[in-house]
Amino acid sequence: MAMKTEPFVVNMGPQHPSTHGVFRMRLTLDGERIIDADMVMGYLHRSMEKLAEERTYTQNIPFTDRMDYVSAMTGNLAYVLAVEKLCGIEVPERAQWLRVIMSELQRFASHSMAVGVFANECGVWFTPLMHMFREREKILDLFEMACGARLTTNYMRIGGVSRDVPPEFMPAAYKLVKELPKRMGEYEALLLESEIIVARSRGIGVLLPERAIACSVSGPMLRASGVAWDIRKADPYAAYDKVDFDIAVGTNGDVYDRFLVRIAEMRQSIRILEQALEMMPSGPVHARIPTATVQPGGAPSAPLALRPPVGEAYGRVETPRGELGFYIISDGGPAPFRFHIRSPSFINLTPLPELVRGITVPDAIVILGSIDVVLGEVDR
Amino acid sequence: MPILAHWWDLRNLGNAASALLDRIEAWGAPAWIPYVVAGVIGIVGCLTFLLLSQLSFIWIERRLVARMQNRIGPNRVGPQGLLQPIADTLKLFLKEAITKRSADRTLFWLVPIVILSPGLVAFAVIPFGDGMVLAKLNVGVLFLIAVASLNTLIVFMAGWSSNNKYALLGAMRTVAMLISYELVQVLALLSAVLFVSSMNVSDVVGWQSHFHTWLLFLLPLAAVAYIFAGAVEINRTPVDIAEAESEIVAGYHIEYSGIKFGFLYTAEYFAGFAVAAVMASLFLGGWTAWGLEEWVPGWLIFVTKVYMVFFIYIWSRGTLPRLRIDQLMAFAWKFLLPLSLLNVLLVGGEVLVWQEGGYEAEVVLPIFAVVNWAVAGALVIVWGSVLGHLRPERRPRRALLTKEVGVIVYGQPEPGV
């Protein structure tokens, strides 16, 4: 007698421990095998693009913290780069290097969280995550020293950074950078060489380079597919053209490669930090910006607001998740006319349905973990 | 005052109990009364041990895992957080135990009650010390296996009656995996039984005490297979697939709340202690330890061994990732099962040689130990490479590093570690 079976639908999320917040996958399952997957997002939508059109350019900086809240520094940086490009502002040397230091500290913190969460999704019961939080805490302490905030830093400013680092920052940063390679060795031994992690992640969720490029995927996910593309090298910003580092690439495009690339990038971040701490010059950390330009017919309510000339600019940085870009159109007023965000988390989700189709639920969770999305940035 | 001097010595508990029964019989009570009294004494004893162990292990496990995770763990309720388990229990009692409207009410309520039984009744045949056993069952090992397989049914009851998709997924996984690993478990225990040629757990312990050895040294493969199958049975990492938190949230007990969840949680510990107790009795010498039982009460040795085995499970929970269900099944059917079968064959041959040849145990047992360890190592390596576990694509490696922007290196040979 033939057994009658039928597929059933499982809502994975928005309340699920492995959906990185409020992501929702509507899975159609045949047993444990996924026949179809719908992605549902928007649970965290805060209408940032529209909100930004009502606020001055400086007031928009805190919004960029709250998009990718795991990597606030790089979010700030991408936005201020776009505005600086729009106004043609030259940023002082010291501020450039501070931006590099903060970005790389943030990258290390964000990747350590990504790797820890990925291990969690492979089924380790929080141990690597808690160990990685130890290093992340120290980095957040450094951020607190520099700008008073730990998570939503709001540190970058148009024309520089909000303030210079205090004198105790440099010794603490040196100490941390000396300590990190030892910790990296521990993580590599615990996770990267773990038989079960290899078995769980090799050959799973393979994304071919052509498909990755076609989906406009960026960041570690693109590099894991074997495409050596990094905004820090391809379109250097801040002081990245003055430091020596390598692009980490994978050769198989599977989950394990994404994980490897992140681990290797953490090593490269340490390398960049070592150089940046050595080469940091002294001087001002903020350029003079033409805030008081009152244009004819300008809104009197914001007389000191920055009014960029009419035009458009696209500023992009390599965040831990990929290429974060801000496309800003100015009509000469105190607020942007159009404020568009190209968020890597959102675009990296594009190939997810095709990656999870035909595999089992545990693999789908691991693949989602390897993409490393932040829902604040997906939904904005 | 000899009694006070030995207040900790429970060795005489069995004797005291039988003296009490004799007294009852001498009073002329009908025959069923001493029978029932004996049962009640034994059950109360086992339950006391299990509940006390569970209460202490809630705290021990949380503190140990916290240590492994670079945290502090519970330290607020009572000194060093020692009263945390009591606070947890109170909280579970006070919480509402929700029953879904769409759940199958009878089955749903039955599960928390019956799920305690397999772990509990397993202790009926396990000797805590010399004579400290509730039932000297001559098919004790068979009884243990039968009781352990009850779990499958109860977990599936929980998953089915919850009327929840995650619970059903968890229950399906549990059934598939427990059935596969029962075979491995049976074969592992079978080789121990073959060596001792008795199914009575007390006899197995007595055999190990008599020959001054542990079956762990004689049967390494069976011991490892049993400890892994035990991990499957009690849902511990690396095989906590039935309740995989990151995938199907909590599996079969997702819909249980309040004290009903408390019972399921307790049952997990009971089953864990049962597995550890079987391991300790059959492979680690039970309540004996090379004459140490002359100086230290046997139950203390036994309980220490049980806790040490349980620690392995806590340790793996704090360290290891989870396998996928198909990998776990492949491990059972392709790896552990053939190896266990070969192991049983080998052990059978050894027992035959020993009995037919009439050799001295002092001569034969060390040789068997060496042979079995060598064979176990060789089998694991050879069979592992046959299955392709040593192939380069199963090895860890590192990412490539490049300075060129825009090149595509997909498919290039990869650097190893």
Image (tube, coloured by chain):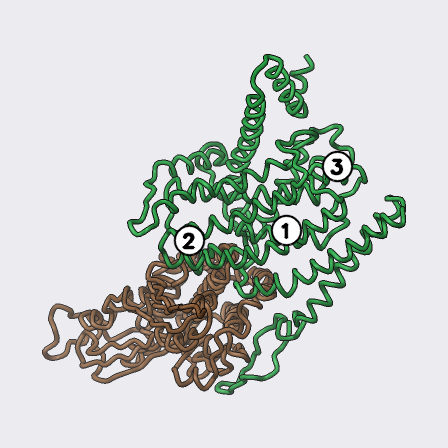
Q: Nearer the viewer, mark 3 or mark 1?
A: 3
Q: Quadrant of the N terminus of chain A?
A: bottom left
Q: Position of residue B194 (x, y in %)?
A: 74, 48
Q: Chain of mark 3?
A: B
Mark positioned earlier in the residue sequence (3 or 1): 3
- Measure how far apart labels 1 and 2 are at the Cα level: 25 Å
Q: Quarter of the image holding residue B12?
A: top right
Residue B292, can we see it? Answer: yes
Q: Secondary structure at mark 2?
A: helix
**Disc number at residue A89?**
none
Q: Position of residue A263 (x, y in %)?
A: 53, 69
Tell if the residue under mark 3 belongs to the same chain as the one under mark 1: yes
**Towards the viewer: B398 or A255:** A255
Marks 2 and 3: CB-CB under 8 Å? no
* Same chain for the residues under marks 2 and 3 in the image: yes
The earlier-in-sequence mark between 2 and 3 is 2
Same subunit under labels 1 and 2?
yes
The alpha-carbon separation of the residues under discs 2 and 3 comes to 41 Å
Q: Residue furthest left?
A: A297
The picture places residue B371, in percent across and down from the top left corner, at 82, 56
Task: Tell how many labels.
Answer: 3
Q: Which mark is residue B159?
A: 2
**Dot 2 alpha-carbon crowd within 10 angstroms: few under 14, some 14 to 19, many 20 or more:** many
How far apart in space, not on screen, are marks 3 and 1 (Cα)? Answer: 22 Å
Query: In the image, what residue type sits under mark 1?
Result: Ile
**Spot occupied by residue A258 in the image (x, y as percentages of width and height):** 50, 73
The one nearer the camera, A237 or B362, is B362
Residue receiving disc 1? B227
Disc sitting over residue B206 in the figure: 3
| Residue at figure coordinates x 69%, y 58% from the top left | B340
Colour of the chain lettered A: brown
Question: Callout 3, which amino acid?
Answer: Gly
